[in-house]
Amino acid sequence: MAFPHKLYLVTNELACKGKKLLDVVAAAVKGGVDIVQFRDKHATEEVFTNTATELQSLLSKNNIPLIINDRWQVAQYIHAYGVHVGNSDLSPTAIRAAWPQCNCLGYSIEYEEQLNNTEIIPSDYLGISPVFNTSTKVDTVREWGLDGIRWMRKATTKPLVAIGNINLTNVADVIKAGADCVAVVSAICSADDPEKAAAMLRNEIEKNSRS
Ligand SMILES: Cc1ncc(COP(=O)(O)OP(=O)(O)O)c(N)n1
Ligand SMILES: Cc1ncsc1CCOP(=O)(O)O
Ligand SMILES: [Mg+2]
């Protein structure tokens, strides 16, 4: 599966610091975000489904794919583009079996051994998780660093999405190390001007991409 996306917004309502989540997402898309993940680890099923539905409506008007974090049944129900899962979630193989129409299945890589695991095969992209330690997600195993990106680039041909404390100061290095796409929470959600923050990140990615 082709993965043409370069700048991936992962949402976090708290990180938006009082701004409305949908406004932040709309601004980020104007700035150059080309794929969005709805991630809320605490919302009830009802609130989660309602917000996911609103995001799907906003993003489909802009031809931007929506990925749902963890809750693949909500993703299927709202006809989202896909789902992102990690080691504590239902496996990619099981999701493919339960939801054959899923267009895009993302899978977090926290351990080197995962690259020898058959779960890589049904995955459409791999999340390098995290590249740098971040206060946005503290239940992590280790930070991969730039060397980890370089290692993964050599170890697999799957599209690589880098995530974890990526911002304007390090995004060029992350791309040069071999990531195909950069995912951020705080660098956009917490910015005073999310549109400008997205535009600056996108510009830096384009300047340093191989294609
Ligand atoms: C693009 C991307 N990469 C990694 C993750 C982390 O997923 P996971 O390991 O399942 O952890 P939670 O996000 O569920 O806390 C991600 N969400 N997105
Ligand atoms: C969801 C997730 N998965 C690995 S790190 C992370 C959070 C990234 O957030 P930030 O861009 O604010 O560091
Ligand atoms: Mg998860």
Image (cartoon, helix red, strand yellow):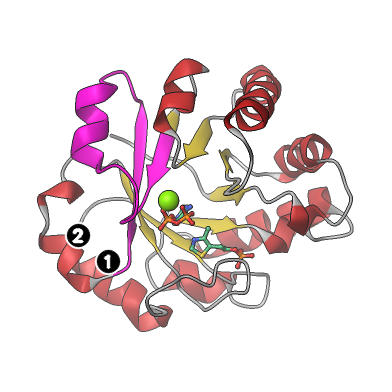
Q: Quadrant of the N terminus?
A: top left
Three-letter amino acid code of the residue under disc 1: Arg
Give percent across and percent down for residue 206: 57, 56
Q: Nearer the viewer, residue 47 or 69?
A: 47
At 49% from the left and 25% from the top, the residue drawn is 74
Q: In terms of secondary structure, where does tag 1 sit?
A: helix
Tell me the number on the disc at residue 14: none
Residue that appears at 51% across and 76% down: 173
How many numbered dots are placed on residues in this image?
2
Residue 195 within the segment the image draws in magenta: no
Label 1: which residue?
Answer: 153
Determine which quarter of the picture holds residue 105. top left
Residue 156, numbered label: 2
Q: Nearer the viewer, residue 138 or 31?
A: 138
Tell me: is circle 1 under 8 Å from ligand 1: no
The residue range painted magenta reads 83-110
Residue 160 vs 151, above or below: the answer is: above
Q: Amino acid at mark 2?
A: Thr
Q: Is residue 103 within the magenta segment?
A: yes
**Marks 1 and 2 close (CB-CB < 8 Å):** yes
The image shows residue 55 at horizontal and vertical percentages of 67, 28
Q: Is residue 92 left or right of residue 30?
A: left
Residue 196 position, x and y percent, is 82, 54
Q: Give the side of residue 25 with respect to residue 6, left or right.
A: right
